[in-house]
Amino acid sequence: MSHRLTIYLEEDMYDALKSRLMKKAEKNEDAQDAIAKNEKQPESKARQELLKEELGKLSLDADEELLKLAQSLLNVLKESSDKAGKYNVDVQNSQGIVVGDNSNVTQNFGDTGRKKQK
């Protein structure tokens, strides 16, 4: 699957999951607000906790469709991150870069006491 197609798939699945959550929260304004706030700042621990608290009031574990949507999105995200690679390396103005697990490398730079050949 192409990277662009994967992104569209992830977005569609996310939108479907969010739509289902909003439907479940239609009578709970606090839950709707928590979803919207978390979406604006998803890295905020406080907003994550608020979302967790509000969603906990909705009995979501009984909604099979919601659970399937969530699991499908998690599967696509995992597959996409697996294909992206294990390492994200950004190297600039460097020498002797080693990337990987359990590397055993000896590197010598500059004058190492060897005589230069002419």
Image: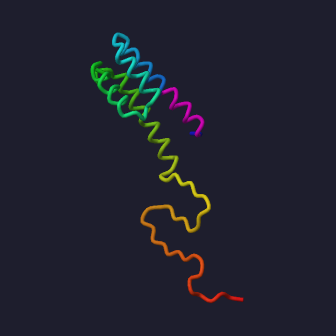
Query: Which one is in front, 19 or 64?
Result: 19
Residue 105's place in the image compared with 14, above or below, is: below
Magenta residue span = 3-13
- Left or right of 15 on screen, residue 48: left
Query: Which one is in front, 33 or 100?
Result: 33
**Residue at 62%, 89% in the rendered image:** 115
Q: Quadrant of the C terminus?
A: bottom right
Residue 28, position as x, y percentages in the image: 34, 13
Q: How is the image coloured?
A: rainbow
Residue 2's place in the image compared with 16, above or below, is: below
Residue 61, position as x, y percentages in the image: 29, 24
Residue 25, position as x, y percentages in the image: 36, 15
Residue 98's place in the image compared with 9, above or below, is: below
**Residue at 53%, 31% in the rendered image:** 9
**Residue at 60%, 58% in the rendered image:** 92
Task: Please state the total of marks drawn on the protein image.
Answer: 0
- Left or right of 86 on screen, residue 90: right
Is 103 inside the magenta-drawn segment? Answer: no
Displayed quadrant of residue 8: top right
Query: Which one is in front, 51 or 5?
Result: 51
Residue 89, position as x, y percentages in the image: 54, 54
The kind of secondary structure the magenta stretch mainly shows is helix
**Residue at 45%, 71% in the rendered image:** 104
- Left or right of 50 on screen, residue 84: right
Q: Quadrant of the N terminus?
A: top right
Residue 102's place in the image compared with 117, above or below, is: above
Residue at the extreme right of the image, as rendered: 118
